[in-house]
Amino acid sequence: MNVLMVGDIVGGPGRTIFARYVGGLKRRGEVDVVIANAENAAGGKGLSRVLADELFAAGADVITLGDHTWDQKDIVSYIGTERRLIRPANFAPGCPGRGFVTVETPKGRVTVLNLVGRVFMPPFDCPFRAADAILGKEPALGKVILVDMHAEATSEKIALGRYLDGRVSAVVGTHTHVQTSDEALLPKKTAYITDLGMTGPKDSVLGRDLPSVLSKFLTGMSCKFEIADKDVMLEGAWIDIDEQTGRARRISRIRERLEST
């Protein structure tokens, strides 16, 4: 099974390159399932219903979110009806939506689990125990299980990867918008990378326009961070998984530049 996991999509530039790159892969039959983190897709703050539908139409099979899940008002009602859109499973009980989903693909059943970290982040429930609860009580998850750990601290992501090694097919990190070079197969054949990176404008500060971010750092005054638009790239990871066992065979990070048309 060929799996593409895409790092944080930021604004219109990120959505554009996602559609072009993933659309081509889907047309050529080169990918079996696409998972994308889109919590910054709406101008850098959250995801709207319209933009979620746009990303699904572009080729996303499952969309994951993070700490900006509730930034767009219409997502509250939409997330309860669109099962392919998931938010972190360790949000407080009673939050709309769900933290994992199982979908059918041409190569078999795939489960995607979304978690959010607690180190240097707002207060959330324990991601480790949330993963345990889902993995222990859901016998219909299937062999292929993919985890998006949306977290700030590298130590927390690495710890979760090691904790789930052999119990899931892949653990990938999102949130920092900076791709790491530590992609690896863990000892029990779980694919791992600390951060997939960012799908958006690289000539920026985490996708935001340089002048507005510098103004914040230099003055300490609040200002609107505009989305940059130059040197747009898609970052993420390709993961090859044995669909019969759920064990990963290889993982490789990717960086694709948007070519002008």
Image (spheres, grey):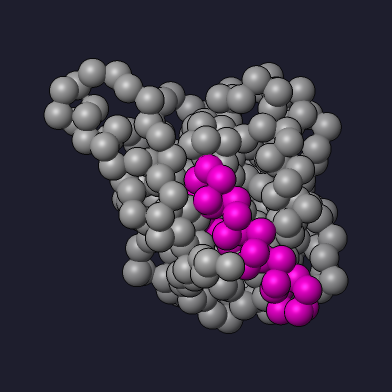
Q: Which one is in front, 120 or 23?
A: 23
Question: Where on the picture, by quarter, is residue 65?
Answer: top right
Locate residue 127 relative to residue 204 in the image: left or right.
Answer: right
* Chief secondary structure of the magenta portion: helix
- On-image quarter of the C terminus: bottom right
Residue shown at 76% from the left, 23% from the top: 77
Where does the magenta region start and end? 5-31
How many marks can you see?
0
Q: In the displayed structure, would residue 249 be above or below residue 180?
A: below
Q: Which one is in front, 4 or 230?
A: 230
Instruction: Confirm whether the magenta stretch covers residue 3.
Output: no
Q: In the displayed structure, would residue 136 be above or below residue 89?
A: below
Instruction: Confirm whether the magenta stretch covers residue 23.
Output: yes
Residue shown at 23% from the left, 27% from the top: 216
Residue shown at 78% from the left, 74% from the top: 27
Question: Where on the picture, by quarter, is residue 90?
Answer: top right
Q: Which one is in front, 13 or 93?
A: 13
- Image location of residue 142, percent across then percent down: 77, 61
- Image location of residue 244, percent across then percent down: 76, 77
- Image location of residue 103, percent across then percent down: 81, 55
- On-image quarter of the N terminus: bottom right
Q: In the displayed structure, would residue 225 be above or below residue 257?
A: above
Q: Can residue 101 be seen in this view?
A: no
Q: Residue furthest left?
A: 218
Q: Which one is in front, 167 or 5?
A: 5
- Image location of residue 110, percent across then percent down: 75, 61
